[in-house]
């Protein structure tokens, strides 16, 4: 019972930690050195307007993608924000708020920037980056653990087939996003994710995903390749939410996934977490925590009562057994406490 209570307590702490507001994990960034701006320039003013547009409260994040253009001539700035396809719109919006605030600390005076976080990507430039394929620069992340020697060939086969299958699905979908999973061993599954920015054509998405997949490690138990226009990832554990995955394309949809010619060398959600999440999760967590503690108390009391009454022919004394009315009152106190917290 102690191990069970400890497990419940630990899980509740995790829920409260995430609901209280944490920054999305930063992965990496690229600041273009082609052109700079000053803080009193028109470009800087337009950039601030662009970042505000990408994170405005009334923006639609239902597709996980938002883009904007501000300014004219040499002072024009274009930008986009992409959330991973399994992220709910509310979390995506909160990630956008953090990312645009963080951007100018990563690239304080460069006109072009790409910043990757665990669930999202932010890009802006003085050049038009919308509906334009970009496969560099990139960030490659690999798990430090390798598969055993006898499973390396199996990993290569599963990785190639599963990620290619995911790419075929993604290039034919409006969101340019797909999830796939398959058996790796009798006890382990392989999970894959691919995604392009939805403004790319199917052919452009195909080229980007193929390049990203080719760059994945073939011996590690996990890896991801993040490019400006697409990203891919695989793990031997579930790392995404399947409930928000897009439906598969119709059976009669034609695939445009083809092998392109060889390429030339080349995580405040949280800080600004919605009050709705906190208002719902925290009272429930507190109530469950109280319930687990009280349950533990009464079970121990019951065990003590049983041990004591064993010497009395197994008959339970009235003053030793937890009363049903007492337990009902405890449940009532929990419900009342949750109600009070929700209304504070």
Image (spheres, rainbow, N blue to C red):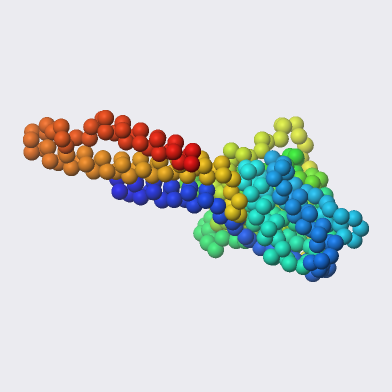
Q: Residue at x 34, y 47 (%)?
A: 5
The correct choice, above or below, for 264 with respect to 92 in the image is below
Quarter of the picture containing the N terminus is top left
Residue 37: % across, % down: 82, 67
Residue 144: % across, % down: 55, 63
Q: Residue at x 27, y 43 (%)?
A: 297
Q: Residue at x 44, y 43 (%)?
A: 285
Would you say residue 248 is visible in this rendering? yes
On screen, residue 189 versus residue 128, left or right, reads left
Compare residues 163 and 15 and report the one nearer the observer: 15
Q: Residue at x 59, y 56 (%)?
A: 23
On screen, residue 215 versus residue 184, left or right, reads right
Task: Give residue 228's quadrant in the image.
Answer: bottom right
The correct choice, above or below, for 202 with respect to 133 in the image is above
The residue most toward the right is: 73
On screen, residue 199 versus residue 316, left or right, reads right
On screen, residue 137 versus residue 157, left or right, reads right
Would you say residue 166 is visible in this rendering? no
The residue most toward the front is: 344
């Amino acid at each position: 019972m102690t191990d069970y209570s400890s497990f419940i307590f630990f899980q509740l702490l995790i829920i409260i930690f995430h609901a209280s507001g944490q920054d999305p994990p930063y992965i990496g960034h690229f600041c273009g050195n082609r052109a700079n701006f000053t803080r009193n320039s028109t470009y800087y003013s337009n950039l601030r307007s662009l970042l505000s547009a990408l994170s405005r409260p009334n923006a639609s994040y239902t597709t996980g993608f938002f883009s904007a253009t501000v300014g004219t001539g040499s002072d024009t700035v274009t930008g986009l924000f992409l959330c991973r396809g399994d992220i709910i719109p509310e979390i995506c919006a909160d990630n956008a708020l953090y990312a645009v605030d963080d951007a100018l600390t990563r690239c304080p005076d460069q006109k072009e920037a790409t910043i990757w976080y665990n669930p999202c990507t932010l890009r802006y430039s003085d050049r038009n980056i919308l509906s334009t394929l970009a496969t560099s620069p990139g960030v490659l992340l690999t798990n430090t653990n390798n598969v055993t020697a006898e499973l390396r060939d199996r990993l290569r086969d599963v990785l190639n087939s599963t990620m290619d299958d995911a790419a075929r699905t993604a290039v034919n979908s409006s969101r340019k996003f797909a999830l796939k999973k398959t058996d790796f061993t009798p006890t382990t599954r392989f999970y894959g994710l691919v995604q392009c920015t939805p403004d790319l054509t199917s052919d452009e998405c195909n080229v980007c995903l193929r390049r990203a997949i080719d760059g994945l490690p073939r011996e590690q138990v996990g890896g991801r390749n993040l490019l400006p226009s697409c990203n891919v990832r695989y793990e031997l554990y579930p790392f995404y939410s399947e409930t928000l995955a897009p439906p598969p394309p119709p059976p009669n949809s034609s695939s445009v996934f083809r092998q392109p010619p060889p390429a030339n060398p080349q995580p405040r959600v949280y800080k600004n977490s919605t009050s709705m999440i906190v208002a719902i999760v925290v009272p429930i967590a507190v109530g469950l925590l109280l319930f687990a503690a009280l349950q533990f108390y009464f079970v121990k009391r019951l065990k003590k009562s049983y041990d004591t009454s064993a010497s009395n022919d197994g008959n339970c004394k009235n003053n030793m057994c937890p009363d049903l009315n007492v337990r009902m009152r405890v449940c009532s106190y929990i419900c009342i406490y949750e109600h009070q917290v929700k209304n504070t």
